[in-house]
Image: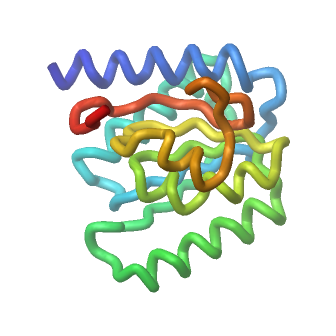
Amino acid sequence: MSFMLDRSMCRWFSAILLCLFISSLQAEDVLLISSYHKTDACGQPQYEAALDALEQGGLSGLTTKAYYLDARIKSREEMLTTVEQIKQEMRASRPKLVFTFDDTAFAMLYEEVLAHPETKMVFSGLNRDLDYYDGRKRFMENRTPVANITGIFEYLFMHE
């Protein structure tokens, strides 16, 4: 089951990247932001799938930068400090692509990405319904992304 899930995520990331972003990516344009620590059982497979998708898309030469919010370990204040550092880097370097893994990373950064339409975001592992986030800052129309954000839900724990 775990192998199938990882392989499925990798295919989804590949399809998303190939369809939306590949033509505009250049070296040093990718940020990967995980809600948890580097070896977390939830975040690590998503992180690895994103790297695999970049490689399968012919983009293995890209330089990437990873951030780990360590939401299960760090205090909220410590996480906010890291998030502010990420936002400053995004404003300064204008990455073409930002991956977020799980709800915490997405929730703390999607509004910043929306403020920079040239930056694309791919989320993975969201449990909270997107309508919640869309209600705070619009990026969907009829449950379809119309802005610079797209991704994959983790329906395991979602309730309609």
Q: How is the image coloured?
A: rainbow
Q: Is residue 32 left or right of residue 23?
A: left
Q: Is residue 63 visible?
A: no
Question: Residue 143: which quarter of the image?
Answer: top right
The quadrant of the image that shows the N terminus is top left
Name, please, the residue furthest toward the left: 1
Query: What residue do we see at 27% from left, 74% from top?
Result: 73
Q: Position of residue 25 (x, y in %)?
A: 78, 32
Question: Foreground residue, 136 or 54?
Answer: 136
Query: What residue do we see at 56% from left, 43% from top?
Result: 99
Question: Residue 111: which quarter of the image?
Answer: bottom right
Q: Is residue 54 left or right of residue 36?
A: right
Q: Position of residue 159 (x, y in %)?
A: 26, 36
Q: Is residue 111 visible?
A: yes
Question: Foreground residue, 12 or 40?
Answer: 12
Query: What residue do we see at 46% from left, 75% from top?
Result: 79
Asked if residue 137 is positioned above or below residue 55 in the image, the reply reads below
Q: Position of residue 147 (x, y in %)?
A: 74, 35
Query: What residue do we see at 44% from left, 62% from top?
Result: 68
Asked if residue 133 is positioned above or below residue 159 in the image, the reply reads below
Q: How many marks?
A: 0
Q: Position of residue 154 (x, y in %)?
A: 33, 33
The quadrant of the image that shows the C terminus is top left
Question: Foreground residue, 55 or 150?
Answer: 150
